[in-house]
Image (cartoon, helix red, strand yellow):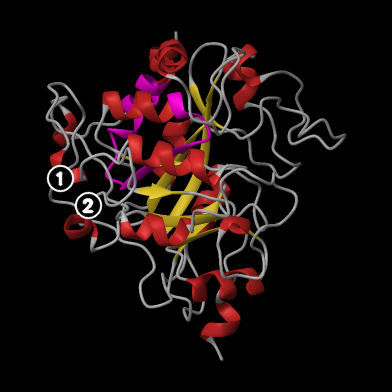
């Protein structure tokens, strides 16, 4: 049933008739090819040595590579389609987030890249939604939609008819969101938990457990890849779950990025293991900023001995930080040298750019 649902909206794309012709994004600093993987024990060979496994989806070599913020101008990544401005993860939000110039001094600032979350319904259709439940976020009373139910336990029609934040916008299919985003705007696809099984959150897994969890991720990741392959965007796949990144790497050559939470060490290890093009930490992990070492995150998790930004740049990875809400955060993190700002607002660099 799920394939029929998505195929009903499918449009013809002549360049995707062969599974051998696929796309991925290079979210990578311009010096990556020269730098390679350096220094630390356990580091893997450079991305230029990646294997040519038959059947893997491939990047469209005609598309330009993306590189992050150079010269203090990080990419602006619209978190859930600028969730502070628009009803998050909706078609209306991504349309609005894409409008405007890709410059901090543009009269109206559009996103360089839009971050969206994907999760399956009970019928295995891929929708764009952040939470496990349609109605409640983090156990709170505020309902994100007007409908009850766990997304992956709810039929597609019910999910896609759920109204988001009384906005008139409803929970969209992934295909509808991709159709609404212009090809020049990149897309960060965050892979959320695809079911009720116990998945390891933001931690490095032993091999046996990793292989076990990958079995749960493979059907969902395959459906997501089948959809994104039909569009001409540059993609970056991120996740808090190592098995999601491992499954994406096995099946494709799209760019990947681990999302970090309370361990710099685990995040760096996962990034090296999959030769990730980027790494996505909370902004509190960036040394040399006023936010570094915020006590909401666990102590003793490998912070003191690793300068995340320095190590990532040495190894050719972009550092895109989440989730910004103020211009002060944006200015400080840009000055520190991060490559992307995952933000709820479009104007986090406005003050410095206009002064």
Q: Is residue 18 above or below residue 330?
A: above
Q: Is residue 297 rendered to the left or right of residue 56?
A: right
**Residue 61: x, y in percent?**
13, 47
Q: Is residue 151 rendered to the left or right of residue 181?
A: right
Quarter of the figure that contains the C terminus: bottom right
Q: Is residue 28 above or below residue 149?
A: below
Q: Are marks 1 and 2 in contact (CB under 8 Å)?
A: yes
Residue carrying label 2? 36
Q: Is residue 170 above or below residue 304?
A: above
**Residue 172: x, y in percent?**
54, 33
N-terminal-most mark, 1 or 2: 2
Q: Secondary structure at mark 1?
A: helix
- Per the rendering, the mark at residue 48 is 1
Q: Is residue 139 rendered to the left or right of residue 220?
A: right
- Per the rendering, the mark at residue 159 is none
Q: Residue furthest right?
A: 141
Q: Is residue 175 rendered to the left or right of residue 33?
A: right
Q: Residue furthest bottom?
A: 355
Segment tinted magenta in the rendering: 221-243
Quarter of the figure that contains the N terminus: top left
Rendered residue at 73%/18% (across/down) = 149
Classify mark 2: residues with Cα within 10 Å, few (<14), some (14-19) or many (20+). Answer: many
Whether residue 90 can be seen here: yes
**Residue 94: x, y in percent?**
51, 50
Pick the front one: 309 or 335: 309
Q: Residue furthest top?
A: 1
Cα–Cα gap, marks 1 and 2: 8 Å
């Amino acid at each position: 049933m799920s394939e029929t649902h998505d195929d009903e909206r499918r449009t013809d794309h002549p360049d995707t008739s062969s599974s051998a012709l696929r796309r991925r994004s290079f979210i990578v600093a311009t010096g990556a090819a020269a730098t390679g993987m350096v220094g630390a024990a356990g580091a893997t060979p450079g991305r230029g040595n990646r294997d040519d496994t038959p059947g893997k989806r491939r990047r469209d070599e005609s598309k330009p590579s993306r590189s992050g913020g150079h010269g203090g101008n990080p990419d602006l990544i619209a978190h859930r389609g600028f969730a502070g401005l628009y009803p998050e993860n909706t078609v209306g939000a991504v349309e609005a987030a894409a409008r405007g110039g890709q410059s901090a001094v543009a009269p109206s600032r559009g996103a360089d890249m839009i971050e969206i979350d994907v999760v399956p319904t009970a019928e295995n259709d891929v929708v764009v939604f952040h939470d496990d439940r349609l109605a409640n976020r983090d156990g709170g009373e505020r309902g994100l939609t007007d409908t009850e139910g766990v997304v992956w336990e709810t039929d597609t029609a019910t999910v896609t008819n759920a109204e988001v934040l009384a906005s008139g916008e409803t929970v969209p299919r992934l295909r509808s969101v991709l159709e609404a985003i212009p090809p020049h705007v990149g897309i960060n696809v965050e892979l959320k938990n695809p079911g009720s099984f116990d998945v390891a959150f933001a931690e490095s897994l032993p091999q046996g457990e990793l292989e076990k969890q990958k079995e749960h991720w493979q059907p969902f990741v395959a459906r997501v890849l089948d959809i994104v392959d039909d569009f001409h965007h540059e993609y970056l796949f991120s996740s808090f779950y190592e098995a999601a990144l491992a499954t994406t790497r096995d099946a494709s050559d799209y760019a990947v990025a681990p999302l970090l939470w309370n361990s710099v060490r685990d995040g760096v290890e996962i990034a090296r293991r999959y030769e990730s093009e980027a790494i996505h930490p909370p902004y509190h992990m960036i040394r040399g900023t006023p936010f570094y070492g915020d006590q909401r995150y666990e102590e003793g998790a490998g912070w003191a001995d690793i300068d995340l930004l320095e190590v990532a740049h040495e190894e050719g990875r972009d550092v895109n930080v989440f989730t910004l809400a103020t211009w002060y955060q944006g200015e400080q993190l840009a000055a520190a040298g991060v490559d992307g700002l995952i933000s709820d607002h479009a104007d986090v660099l406005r003050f410095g750019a206009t002064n």
